[in-house]
Amino acid sequence: MAGARRIESIDVLRGVDMFMLTGGAALIMSGAKLWGDKETAAGVVMQLTHANWGEALTCWDMVMPLFIFIVGASMPFAFAKYRERGGERWQWPTLLRVIRRVVLLFVLGMVVQGHLCSAEPGRMALFCNTLQAIAEGYLIAAIVLMLGWGLRGQVCSILGLLAGYWALLRFVPYAGNAGGLFQPDNNLAIYIDRALQGSWADGTPYSWILTSMSFGALTLMGCAGGELIRRYCSMRSVAILVGSGAACLVAGCLLAYDTPIIKHIYTSSAVLWCGGWCLLLLGVFHLLFDFRTWLAPLGYPFKVLGCNAMLAYLLAEIHGLQGYSLWNSLAAPLLGGTARLCGDASTFVYQLLSYILFWLVFFFLYQHRAFLRV
């Protein structure tokens, strides 16, 4: 199988994630509210809304972990190219590239949600965004890859990070509290965030600093999946991905009896649960789009987005005018009037037209091989 086709599944899966993140979820919800009965609409809305602390994770809760996972899945291919081009001294240029990417991701994360562009330190948040979680996970995974650790080393690193994070949350006392607390405002991860960031903490129950161990583990799970595809690219890799995903789901459920599945602080059980689904999805997409070439047209619309994922994310997430995202600041004046003529269907029509226009922009960029690389 040609090298270019090995990552077809990764591009398509990344595109599906971007579709949900950049307006697909809103389109699905508005369609369910328009045509579905109340029970169906409520179920769809629930699955496309973040779960509260301690509740069962929803489909929407999978979008961020899948984003982090896919970054890891593409890393073995990129680092293999770095080795081929750099020869014996490939590590130093690669290290500089890694540092540059980590810094850019971190700064962009502050731009998206940390109010960096406000130039008002009192409004800024230091850690607050998915891009910063990706930066942390990417750095950890990059170190493992630059050390030359193969699949076995990656798996050991995953287990070590998850075991270490589990032990810290379960047993380390802090500020007069015993270890093992998993309350929204009272757990070791959030305590460390607030103690180190002070007024620059984002004020949410999400943690970022100690939780970098979980982000690293999730990225490395993606690395291991990508390495399997790169190394075997056969039904063997499909079987291992699906089997590993199922094993992670079982392990996550079992660990949840001791440590609850909480996405806000990415407990080890949550990483196993989310990573298990990510591995299963990668295995299924690997089967469908790397071996069933006649299905390629179904994946193409998502691949167009997946190949320019960073630009799609920034357009959908950076704040624009009047509380809109940057993209909706452009789309609302163009399409809002037409949508309002459709009465009860106005929200759905706007979301549909907006996303068609959004996709056409990325189709144009894809056709001209114009991609935003970080």
Image: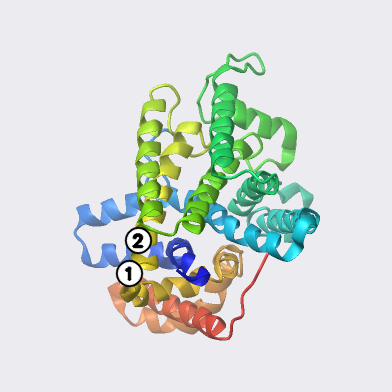
Would you name the residue on which mark 1 appears? 292
* Label 1 packing within 10 angstroms: few (<14), some (14-19), many (20+): few
Where is mark 2, residue-wise? Answer: 287
- The answer to whether mark 1 and mark 2 are in CB contact below 8 A is yes
Residue 223 in the image: state x and y as whole percent: 55, 50
Tell me if residue 206 can be seen: no
Residue depicted at x 62% and y 18%: 172
Query: For numbered disc 1, what is the local secondary structure?
Result: loop
Using the image as rendered, state which of residue 293 and residue 163 is in the foreground: 293
Residue 152 in percent (x, y) is at 54, 39
**Callout 2: SS:** helix
Kind of residue at disc 1? Arg
Classify the position of the C terminus by image quarter: bottom right
* Residue 133 percent across, percent down from the top left: 61, 47
Q: Quadrant of residue 249?
A: top left
From the viewer's perspective, is 91 left or right of 67? right
Q: Could you tell which of marks 1 and 2 lies nearer the N-terminus? A: 2
Q: Is residue 240 visible in the rendered structure shown here? A: yes
Q: Label for residue 25? A: none
The 10 Å Cα crowd at callout 2, few under 14, some 14 to 19, many 20 or more, is: some
